[in-house]
């Protein structure tokens, strides 16, 4: 599977709200972080747990890939994200765009960084 196909499969798992499938495409020590910033979800388990919590809070959460490009060990997506109403009654999050940079080690994703 190409890096692009793997990142697309990760988004499909994300949209299906399947945190287990999403992290199956990641290295054990993978993480999600702000671009050149703080790690938001640490390791495969931290990512799975964090995503499961987000999916529980926003059951209508969805990311649409608007543009995509693969460059060596990197995949870049411009994503349009909608959350929908939160189950905890918190304020509605307006839809937003994000650039996601997927970094690969071998055939697994090692890091996802978000530029927002």
Image (cartoon, rainbow, N blue to C red):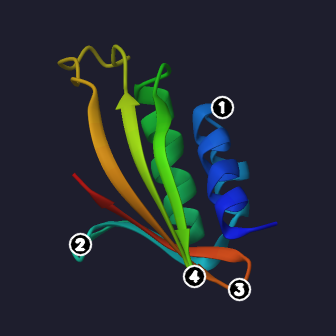
Secondary structure type for disc 4: loop
Secondary structure type for disc 3: loop
What residue would you read off at disc 3?
A: 106
Label 2, label 1: how far apart the Cα atoms are: 26 Å
What is the x, y in percent for residue 60?
48, 19
Check contact, mark 2 vs mark 1: CB within 8 A. no
What is the x, y in percent for residue 2?
75, 68
Label 3, label 2: how far apart the Cα atoms are: 24 Å
Check contact, mark 4 vs mark 2: CB within 8 A. no
* Numbered marks: total: 4
What residue would you read off at disc 1?
A: 16
The residue located at (43%, 38%) in the rendering is 54
What residue would you read off at disc 2?
A: 38
| In front: label 1 or label 3 | 3
Compared to residue 40, the image places residue 85 above or below, namely above
Label 1, label 4: how far apart the Cα atoms are: 27 Å
What is the x, y in percent for residue 32?
41, 65
Check contact, mark 4 vs mark 3: CB within 8 A. no
| Between discs 2 and 1, the one toward the N terminus | 1
Residue extending farthest to the right is: 1
Residue extending farthest to the bottom is: 106
């Amino acid at each position: 599977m190409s890096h692009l196909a793997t990142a697309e499969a990760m988004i499909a798992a994300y949209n299906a709200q399947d945190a287990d499938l999403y992290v199956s495409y990641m290295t054990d020590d993978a993480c999600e972080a702000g671009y050149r910033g703080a790690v938001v979800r640490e390791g495969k388990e931290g990512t799975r747990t964090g995503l499961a919590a987000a999916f529980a809070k926003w059951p209508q959460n969805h990311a649409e890939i608007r543009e995509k490009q693969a460059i060596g060990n990197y995949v870049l997506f411009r994503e349009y994200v909608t959350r929908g109403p939160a189950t905890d009654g918190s304020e509605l999050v307006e839809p937003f765009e994000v650039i996601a940079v997927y970094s690969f080690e071998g055939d697994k994703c090692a890091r996802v960084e978000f530029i927002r």
